[in-house]
Amino acid sequence: MTDICYPSCEQPQTRRGQERRLALLICATDLFLERGYDAVSLDDIVNHAGGSKTSIYKYFGNKEGLFTAICDYRREVFFKGVCVPYIPEKIDLKNYLNQTLIRFYQHIIKPENIAFMRLFTEQTQKDIQLAHYFYDQCALNIQNTIAFALGQANDLNAIYCSNPHFSAMMYFGILRDVEWRLLMGLEVSANDAEITDYINSLYTTKIDNSLK
């Protein structure tokens, strides 16, 4: 079982230290994607990134902590570009949901994100603690963002949604087939307009029908 210790490890206080930590994350990510997690040692990472293993122990605790930190870093970058707060005064719910799902799709089809999803899935199959940690940090986090928007719209009488969290889970299920195809290396439509039209057609029928 993974010892997810990196959150309690020392955080760099200087710009140089922050840059050093980020360099280790990026270098380790490249090596893990190129060779696979098990085939990469801390010595390999240090040889490519420079420095010593002391920095890895200092900032991440161990190899497992380093991988966990990489996943957290990529999660932050990924969802920063996908999830934005729902502000009813600035955007209607249907457009908000459409745009969020389209951004999600555009992110998951990027080759580097596909490769990392496969690596991540492989590692979580081996480590239930890591799986639970990132389900809470990733899947639930993004679902809660949508659930909050649905709940807010329900409170404003814009829609009727009795179970926002369940509805948010089903919302991301719209792209489940795309995710499965990406993970298994199957062909996915490269026609963004086709996907966009598909998403828009779903909400034209489902969201509009729930509007009051």
Image: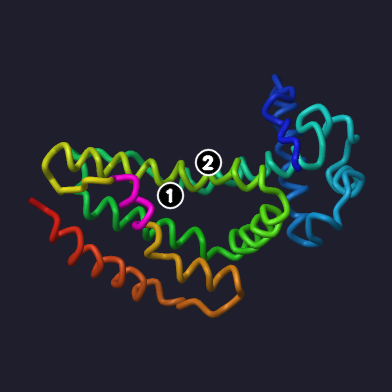
Q: Residue at x 51, y 61 (%)?
A: 108
User: Which residue has dot 1 on it?
Assistant: 82
| Three-letter residue code for mark 1 | Val
**Which residue sits furthest top?**
13
Q: Element at badge 2? A: helix
For the residues marked 2 and 1, what is the alpha-carbon distance in whole angstroms? 17 Å
Given residues 41 and 24, the one toward you in this image is 41
The span picked out in magenta is 164-171
The secondary element bearing badge 1 is classed as loop
Disc marking residue 179? none
Q: Is the residue 144 above or below the residue 101 in the image?
A: above
Do the numbered discs 2 and 1 sit on residues whose CB atoms are within 8 Å?
Answer: no
- Which amino acid type corresponds to the residue marked 2 in the rendered image? Asp
The x and y percentages for residue 86 are 28, 41
Rendered view: 92 above or below 53: below
**In the image: residue 33, left or right of residue 42:** left
Image location (x, y in percent) of residue 19? 71, 33
State whether the magenta stretch is mostly helix, strand or loop. Answer: helix
Q: Position of residue 76 (x, y in %)?
A: 54, 41
Q: How is the image coloured?
A: rainbow
Q: Earlier in the sequence, mark 2 or mark 1?
A: 1
Question: Is 187 one of the magenta-colored residues?
Answer: no
- For residue 102, which quarter of the picture? bottom left
Q: In the rendered view of the protein, which quadrant contains the N terminus?
A: top right
Q: Nearer the viewer, mark 2 or mark 1?
A: 2
**Residue 166 is one of the magenta-drawn residues:** yes
**What number is the disc on residue 136?**
2
